[in-house]
Image (tube, rainbow, N blue to C red):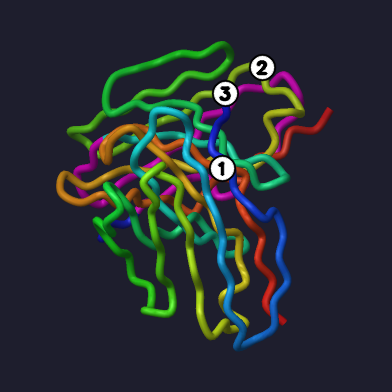
Amino acid sequence: GIQVEQSPPDLILQEGANSTLRCNFSDSVNNLQWFHQNPWGQLINLFYIPSGTKQNGRLSATTVATERYSLLYISSSQTTDSGVYFCAGLLNTGNQFYFGTGTSLTVIP
Amino acid sequence: DAGVTQSPTHLIKTRGQQVTLRCSPKSGHDTVSWYQQALGQGPQFIFQYYEEEERQRGNFPDRFSGHQFPNYSSELNVNALLLGDSALYLCASSPDRALGLHFGNGTRLTVT
């Protein structure tokens, strides 16, 4: 398997602040994804980003596949952004996505 | 267009019992994967089904078994339940092994 490290593990933000979440992989992965898990446990697919940069509203993500990391940017945070953010990737062979331990984000008004 | 649906949403079982969880994939998706998420952890891969066959299995004992039906829906069965099996069980579908996962809302299993 591979190790997936996410940092920081916990983050508290004032509403309106910006943040950067990081995901490091111990081996090369394909098909990197970012997810948001809301307080009810639902995992929402934020980005499918094997490489490059994508933006969706206040969120954007960048993956540097050659250096085995990905970043998730949250700008002008809102209380609804609270929850746990996970990254996950797939090895070149195999069908198993490996998840990190997540970053728990709390946005306070 | 319905997304991934799972049933039941919550379940309470006694140690030693057996449980069956169900999943219907998103329309157009033929690959179903099951994940177990313990409290405070990231999801852990149990297995993946494609064309009614188990294509890959994670590090879970044989007590965990599954099935995929011709309509691509899937079941996860867990026998001889242990307290440690208490977790959120997530089903994910995708149009191909390598493409993005779409998750259902999960089944929260409590073993007492």
Please provide percent x and percent y for residue A44: 56, 34
Q: Which residue is mark 3?
A: A74
In what quadrant of the picture does the C terminus of chain A appear? top right
Q: Residue furthest front?
A: B70
User: Label 1 to label 3, Cα distance in Å?
Assistant: 24 Å
Foreground mark, 1 or 3, reads 1
Principal secondary structure, stretch drawn in magenta: strand
> Do callouts 1 and 3 mark residues in contact (Cβ within 8 Å)?
no
B81 in magenta:
no
Task: Residue at 41% x, 37% y: name it.
Answer: B101
Q: Say if A65 sits above or below B105 in the image.
A: above
Task: Residue at 37% x, 79% y: name it.
Answer: B62
> Chain under label 2?
A
Foreground mark, 2 or 1, reads 1
Magenta-colored span: A4-30
> Chain under label 3?
A
**Badge 2: how crowded within 10 Å, few (<14), some, or many (20+)?**
few
- Looking at the rendered structure, the kind of residue marked 3 is Ile
Q: Which residue is mark 1?
A: B104
Please provide percent x and percent y for residue A61: 42, 23
Q: Which residue is mark 2?
A: A76
Hey, which quadrant is residue B112 in on the image?
bottom right
Task: Residue at 56% x, 45% y: name it.
Answer: A103
Query: As rendered, which of A31 and B110 lies closer to the eye?
Result: B110
Q: Is disc 2 in the same subunit as disc 1?
A: no
